[in-house]
Image: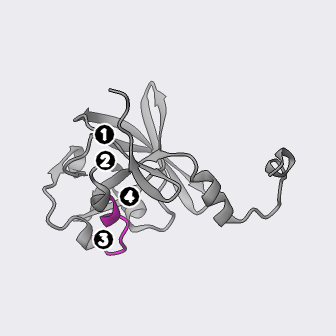
Amino acid sequence: MSLAALHMESDSLDPRRFRTVIGAFATGVAVITTAFEGAFHGMTINSLTSVSLDPCLLLVCPRRGSATGAAIRGSGAFAVNIRAADQRDLSHRFVRADIAERFAELDIELGPRGVPLLPGAIAHLCCRVSAIHPGGDHEIVVGEVRTCSDAGGHPLLFHKGSFGAFRGDA
């Protein structure tokens, strides 16, 4: 493909093409969780970005209209559970449509404001919702990090539609 073809603009970019190309950017995998009206909610994401150190802010992007996104909006709090390399199955579980089964038989700890913390995470970040902005078919949720912890280990990664692991040189 020529360089010119790479830089052509289109008024109607095919979303599937965009998804394929953006998939070349490897991301970490996390599950965002919250508790709202007596129920736990959670979903697997790879849209996690640090925003600021003063104050400590991050952003996540749940799909607009998702039950987890609505619960985060309602509760005003959420946790980010960064998945370990050996937790592909758990990450798949939080993609399934059946929300009730996502937390079944998991040893849940509760963080601040009752947000569920998933076992085996290499890190947890507990956040208070600071702002929510529209973002196409998603919402951009900015969270102020109130507490965080890390347990070490290797992260689960997502690249071109597949899970993998980063082992590093150490």
Q: Which residue is mark 4?
A: 44
Residue at 61% x, 59% y is: 19
Q: Earlier in the sequence, mark 1 or mark 4?
A: 4
The quarter of the rendered structure image containing the C terminus is top left
Question: Residue tagged by mark 1?
Answer: 154
- Mark-to-mark CA distance, 3 and 1: 27 Å
Give the class, few, some or many, for how many residues have Cα within 10 Å of label 1's Cα (few <14, many ≥20): some
* Residue 109 magenta: no
Disc sitting over residue 99 in the figure? 3
Q: Nearer the viewer, residue 132 or 87?
A: 87
Tell me the element at label 3: helix
Kindly report which numbered mark, 1 or 4, lies closer to the viewer in this rendering: 1
Which of discs 3 and 1 lies nearer the camera? The answer is 1
Residue type, numbered disc 1? His
Residue type at the position of mark 2: Ala
Q: Could you classify mark 3 by the number of other residues whose Cα lies within 10 Å: few (under 14), some (14-19), or many (20 or more)?
A: some
- Give the residue at mark 2: 85
Choose the circle earlier in sequence order: 1 or 2.
2
- Tell me the element at label 1: loop
What's the residue type where badge 4 is placed? Answer: Thr
